[in-house]
Amino acid sequence: MSNISVGSICSGIEAASIAWGNKSFDFSWFSEISPFPSKLLSTKYPEIPNLGDMCEIPDRLVKGEIPAPDLICGGTPCQAFSLAGWQKGLTDDRGNLTLKFVDIINANDRVRLDEKKNRTIVFWENVEGVLRDKTNAFGCFLASLAGYDAEINIGGKWPQSGLIRGPIRNIAWRIIDAKYFGLPQQRKRLYVVAGGKDFNPEDVLFEVGPKPLTISTKRQTLHFNVEGHSMEVFRSYTDCLYSAYGTKWNGNAAAYNGSLFVSQNGRLRRLTPLECERLMGFPDNYTDLPGAKLTSRYQAVGNSWAVPVIEWIGHRILETLSGNATSIFQFIPEHLKGTYQEFNNIWFLGKELIPLRGSNYLNGTTTPCNPVEGEIQSVLDTKPEEKLYITPVGCKGILRRKQERGLKMNARLEDVLLNISSTWSDKDIEAVSRLQPRGKFSESKNNNSTSEEQIANLDLWDVKL
């Protein structure tokens, strides 16, 4: 089988190229408009053109200005569907880029069919929030991709896995958690695979096999000695990385359950960009471009894909195309078929394993049949920048917000915060706290009772949060 040509939409920093680069996939073009990811693409992949705005791609395909690849992958902006975003769905322009993605697939198919080639293989990723979007974004996406004239509306939240055999394309979807692919990060994402009527996407996303082994049956140690450094973390895996993971600590669960922080030699700090890269499966310092800001690196990594999951899906796409995959459809029970309106070629697998004859199961759950446990120790970076450390002022502020909002906190993290904040007197903490601006409505520094000269004379850590 010849190599599969790939077009990448909303490419970001190209997790797909890392996952598939040496596995019979050849990337024809990227499409990315954000400055930092675009710079990274031109630096890492100078031979592959970046087309820029995805909205222009359908016209360029039809005009023959760019090649029509065998596979198109992409993750259209998730902010319209995520818990961290506004959840506006298709009323948000970013959400409507999901339907523009389908326009690209249709234009690519038009060219490929004229060239007597098979329809495009489609790979799409997004946050699981799209399944419960109030504008039924997922139903609109599935209907337009499958070739229906009307949206598929099941009257509520979509199940976490399923299959459609539509008039034009077959589609399978499944939520998968990166935590079971060797990454110590809980990252549940929705993956959709589709293709023409001769393509079976269920063979890619679903599995038939033994009941998955239970991982994390024993509590991992959270205190390590790494290269002579005393290191402590507060959980055996982190929450899902997001674009501002390393730059914000207040107002989110990760700040209070311990996911954001590492204790190193008795001082508390945020995760480094290198640690975030490792949590996503990227090579070390992949985003460390000359002059790159920490914020740009955090955003780029947090917006990307979990590399081992993409690698697993890519391998299964190759198996399906080569005819070596297990034929899954024969194992899908008839009673799983949906009967919503006229859309009766839909099967919903849901959250549970489906028992088959013998000891095997049909698996469309978040856990693969052969899960791999990641080790949080493996991501730790012993050379963080000084500005990533949290000062006693910052520690006190986290504790204050926890108290004011009545929030729960990781008990060990709370102990560490108390220990660090107690190394300064309340007077010194108040002095530095007053000196630091507190947003656009804060009083001028000149109105504070403590002068900058007085603060400078304090023998304190860097006060920046």
Image (tube, rainbow, N blue to C red):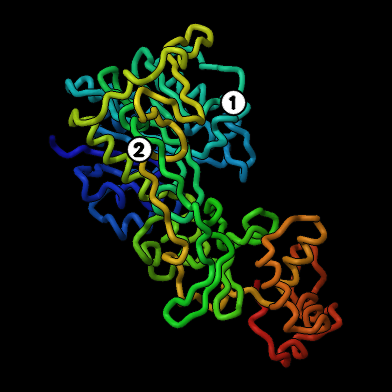
Give left or right: position of 322 versus 132. left
Q: Residues within 10 Å of mark 2 (few under 14, many from 20)?
A: many
Observer-side mark, 2 or 1, equals: 1
Q: In this view, does 334 lie to the left or right of 328?
A: right
Identify which amino acid the numbered label 2 is placed on. Answer: Cys
Please indicate whether residue 399 sits to the left or right of residue 266 in the image.
right
Residue 204 visible? The answer is yes
x 56%, y 80%: residue:
265
Which secondary structure lies at badge 2? strand
Identity of the amino acid at label 1? Lys
Which of the two residues, 267 or 50, is positioned nearer the viewer here? 267
Nearest the viewer among 446 and 20 is 20
Q: Read off the residue under disc 2.
A: 73
Q: Distance between the residues labelled 2 and 1?
A: 25 Å
Measured as percent of width and height from the top left, residue 287 is found at: 40, 62
- Where residue 243 sits: x, y (%)? 53, 54
- Extreme residue toward the front, this view: 358
Which residue is denoted by mark 1 in the rendering? 157
Write the residue at 70% across / 59% down: 409
* Badge 1 density bin: few <14, some 14–19, many ≥20, Cα 10 Å: some
The image quadrant of residue 238 is bottom right
Which comes sooner in the sequence, label 2 or label 1?
2
Say whether marks 2 and 1 touch (CB < 8 Å): no
Question: On the image, which quarter does residue 361 sit in?
Answer: top left
Q: Quadrant of the C terminus?
A: bottom right
> Does residue 177 sit above or below 356 in this rendering?
below
Q: What's the residue at 34%, 26% (across, down)?
A: 358
